[in-house]
Amino acid sequence: LKEDPNYIPTLEDEVEAQRQAMVKKLRDSGKKGTPVTEETFREWQERKRAKHREQVKKKVEAELKKKKGGKGLAVLSGRDLYEYKKELFKDDDDALAVVEEEEQVEAVAQKVETDLFLEGDDDDLPSDLEDD
């Protein structure tokens, strides 16, 4: 494919070339990468999450220390806000019931509309009932 004179390298080709170069460099150096097991992955993940929580906490505290309170929690993304203060996010247990009730009301309204109003032409109405 690369021998084709009209071939244009893609981003994926560039990334793969860089990956292959890194693998060759690692192999040539004689080092072996850290083997990833479930345990080491969980440790790494927990360290990363703890570090992220600390950064979020510092960001909020810095905003709140500003004169007039700064922007407060508004500087956080939704995920950061959830991780910082989970009690702000309470799921409404009745939310699904409300949606189902709205769907039932819509279905009844549609049925009433089709039952009450004529479908088609008004030609068969007596002439004294027709609008001018």
Image: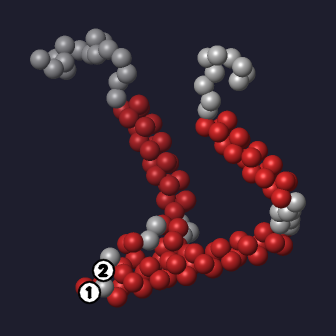
**Residue ID for mark 2:** 70
Rendered view: 11 above or below 69: above
Answer whether residue 86 is visible to the viewer in this image.
no
| Secondary element at image label 1 | helix
| Type of amino acid at the residue the image marks with label 1 | Lys
Quick check: marks 1 and 2 in contact, CB under 8 Å? yes
| Type of amino acid at the residue the image marks with label 2 | Gly
Q: Residue furthest left?
A: 132
What residue sits 81% from the left and 56% below the top?
26
Rendered view: 63 above or below 28: below
What residue sits 65% from the left and 73% below the top?
48
Q: Position of residue 95 (x, y in %)?
A: 51, 63
Q: Quadrant of residue 17?
A: top right
Q: Position of residue 93 (x, y in %)?
A: 56, 69
Q: Position of residue 10 (x, y in %)?
A: 61, 32
What residue sits 41% from the left and 32% below the top?
115
Question: Which of these two is toward me, 11 or 46?
Answer: 11
Label 2 crowding class (10 Å Cα cut-off): few <14, some 14-19, many 20+? Answer: some
Q: Position of residue 98 (x, y in %)?
A: 49, 59
Q: Work out how far the residue at label 1 is from the one at label 2, CA to CA, in angstroms.
A: 6 Å
**Residue ID for mark 1:** 67
Label 1 crowding class (10 Å Cα cut-off): few <14, some 14-19, many 20+? Answer: few
Image quarter of the N terminus = top right
Say the numbered circle drawn on residue 109: none
Image quarter of the C terminus = top left
